[in-house]
């Protein structure tokens, strides 16, 4: 996987993720594979990365790590994970994290993850979060390859 970004004065303004082995290419190199609206899916990944970056910025007593990975999913899909070593998500937060207007941030609106999940589901995929042991969170996005909805295949 190749991840490249350009940084502007206000943070990231360009992002390209390339993973030929999993059929996923965001950025100028978008090709057949995991289909969908490129800009919307880029925004999902960028939102997850920015959230993880904010989470690790709160950490002082251990290494700050943010990891992005891609791979083939068992259900004929592509799996993208964004994990961090931030403070993590308490169990009661995990149950509500994708609800509109729910936030754990002092200045958050509570819309980012809700919108992200809506975009991913509109593309026939799934978005979920799990704890990253021993510290942090992992956000997983699975998208179908070939246009078939993962939601339909999981219901049959």
Image: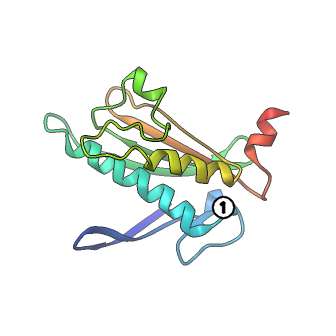
Q: Is residue 137 left or right of residue 10?
A: right
Q: Nearer the viewer, residue 93 or 34?
A: 93
Residue pointed to by mark 1: 23
User: Local crowd at mark 1 within 10 Å, few (<14), some, or many (≥20)?
Assistant: some
Q: Position of residue 61 (x, y in %)?
A: 14, 34
Q: Is residue 26 left or right of residue 84?
A: right
Query: In the rendered view, would you say 103 is above or below 143?
Result: above
Query: In the rendered view, would you say 13 is above or below 151?
Result: below
Label 1: element kind: loop
**Residue at the outermost right position:** 156
**Residue at the outermost top position:** 91
User: Residue 84 is drawn in which quadrant?
Assistant: top left
Q: Nearer the viewer, residue 37 or 1?
A: 37
Residue at 80% from the left image edge and 52% from the top image edge? 148
**Residue at the outermost left position:** 60
User: Residue 103 is drawn in which quadrant?
Assistant: top left
Residue at 85% from the left image edge and 33% from the top image edge? 156
Q: Position of residue 79 (x, y in %)?
A: 60, 47
Q: Position of residue 150 (x, y in %)?
A: 74, 44
Q: How is the protein colored in the picture?
A: rainbow
**Residue at the outermost bottom position:** 28
Q: Position of residue 146 (x, y in %)?
A: 78, 59
Q: Nearer the viewer, residue 151 or 25?
A: 151
Residue at 53% from the left image edge and 42% from the top image edge? 140
Disc count in the image? 1
Q: Is residue 8 left or right of residue 3?
A: left
Residue at 61% from the left image edge and 73% from the top image edge? 30
């Amino acid at each position: 996987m190749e991840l490249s970004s350009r940084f502007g004065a206000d943070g990231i303004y360009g992002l390209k993720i390339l993973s030929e082995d999993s059929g996923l290419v965001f950025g100028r190199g978008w090709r057949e594979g995991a289909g969908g609206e490129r800009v919307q899916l880029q925004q999902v990944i960028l939102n997850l990365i920015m959230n993880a970056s904010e989470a690790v910025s709160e950490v002082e007593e251990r290494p700050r790590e943010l990891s992005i990975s891609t791979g083939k999913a068992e259900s004929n899909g592509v799996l993208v994970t964004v994990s961090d070593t931030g403070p993590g998500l308490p169990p009661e937060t995990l149950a509500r994290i994708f609800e509109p207007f729910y936030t754990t941030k002092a200045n958050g609106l509570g819309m980012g993850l809700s919108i992200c999940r809506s975009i991913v589901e509109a593309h026939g995929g799934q978005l979920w979060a799990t704890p990253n042991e021993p510290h942090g969170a992992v956000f997983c996005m699975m998208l179908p390859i070939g246009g078939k909805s993962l939601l339909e295949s999981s219901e049959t």
